[in-house]
Image: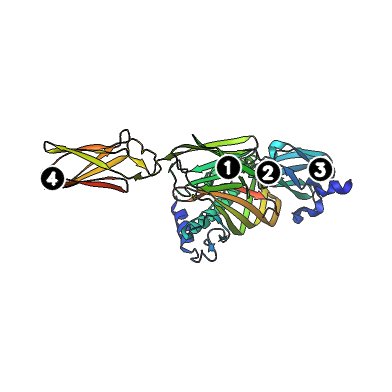
Amino acid sequence: MWRALCKYCIPLATATSLAFAQGPALHAPSTVSAGSPFTVSAGGQGKAAFYLLGPAHVSKRTIELGQDISIRGEEVTASGAYQAVACDSNGCTSAIVQVLPSWPARLSFLLHPSRVPVSAPKAVNATALVFDRFRNTVIAPAKVDFRLSLAGEKVTTRTVQTVRGVASFQMDARPKQGALEVVASLGETAEPRVIQQVASEACRLRMTAVPGGGTVKLQTDPIRDCAGNPLPDGTIVSFTKTDNAGRSTVDTPIKKERASAQFGVSGPARISVACGVVSGNEISIGGRQ
Amino acid sequence: MTARRMLVALLALLSLDSHFGRADVQAAAALPRVVLSAESIAPRQIEQRTGEAVTHDYAQAWKDLAECLNANRTDLLGDYFAGEAKRRVTQRVTEQKQAGLRTHYVDRGHQVKAVFYSFDGGEMQLEDQVQLETQVFDAEKMIYSTTATHKYLVLMTPGSDRWYVRFLESVADDAF
């Protein structure tokens, strides 16, 4: 029994500060869990000053030697090394108490980017940090589940084991546009994040022209990416005309999957269409198409 | 940023070792000695300039930390600490000031291993072994003194022009 008790104690002889070895004898547990109360005993008689020095907490009190010193859980919420120091008229002694993180209770979940083109390779990055309820990093391995759902698709789950409190993965964007929800969970803690998957670049961009009365009306076919996702309204489409009057460009937003424009023309003209980095067909007016 | 601090930062940058990819980077003598090894970092590799910036900013953070704990001034923390790390040190300084204590660090140097760098470059985790001489004073009386190796788990995140220490947690000797 005594051996078992001493396993968790640091006697005076092992206290770190030998320069102050003449102070009162201190016995403290070598490790405690964050937020857990414990007691420190200081041998001797009379009064002494007792200090608790931690990463985020410092306290000083007067103690009666020979009596247990109660340390409240609230005093040791931050994990790390705490120095318990007792000083009397003969000097000071100290003992180290290592406060360990408690069990996993909180997640910080970072999902990047907020918008991503569909099917973009390795474009979705997820990082989850695991903490106890006092925001100490839980170093012991833990399994974080990532649940991925996109409307109309089967829900999938990926489990990643933490290393030093971090779980991360990277994946391709899904081929279908919409809100991709990723929920990181650990026990009863869940943190949802959403990435908006948007259509990728236009695919097979094509326009038609209706000339008449010195003008030409242009309209694209429905503009979609190669997976069939319509590009969102507001995406800019550029129509460029080159004729005897020179070169002019009209930038116009997509409305209901199509973009349209109108040019005045003088003589033969060439008109091209582009959206982002994608070029569409070219039309010749006053000549052959 | 004061002229003095700008000079210190400049000196630190000028003295950075250029062999980061193979070996290490050292911050200037004006700052605590930080040797950063990034050979086992994952999943993303660290760029040389990033390594230099992290080394410098981490050294600067420790310099600020030591000054702050010694002078009981939380205003020295704003430049390189953020989030939970800043909150904890601020609380420590506030409470030790209330108790009439101060902490003096003599920083003997850091062996830092970068172990995690997120895919998107938004977080970097470090393991730090620091040789630290620590003295705690109650008014003029030294109540605690030790020289020991301490281990810290660190999370840094990039800001607009620097890396911030967001978590600085002392861990047990067998943590890494």
- What amino acid is found at the position of numbered circle 2 in the picture? Pro
Q: Nearer the viewer, residue A160 or B165?
A: A160
In the image, residue A17 above or below residue A126: below
**Residue type marked 1:** Glu
The label shown at residue A286 is 4
Amino acid type at circle 3 is: Ser
Nearer to us: label 3 or label 4 = 4
Q: Residues within 10 Å of mark 1 (few under 14, many from 20)?
A: some
N-term-proximal mark, 3 vs 4: 3
**Occupied quadrant, residue A104:** top right
* Residue plotted at (62% across, 35% down): A189
Q: CA distance from mark 4 to mark 2?
A: 78 Å
How far, Cα to Cα, is label 3 from label 4? 101 Å
Are the two marked residues, 2 and 1, in contact with CB atoms closer than 8 angstroms? no
Tag 1 residue: B84
Q: Which of labels 3 and 1 is toward the front? A: 1
Q: Which residue is mark 3?
A: A41
Query: Marks 4 and 2: same chain?
Result: yes
* Residue that label 2 marks: A101
The chain under label 4 reads A
Question: Please, is residue A9 above or below residue A186 in the view?
Answer: below
Question: Could you tell me which secondary element the residue under label 4 belongs to?
Answer: loop
Q: Spatial distance from mark 2 to mark 3, Cα to Cα?
A: 23 Å
Can marks 2 and 1 be said to lie on one chain? no
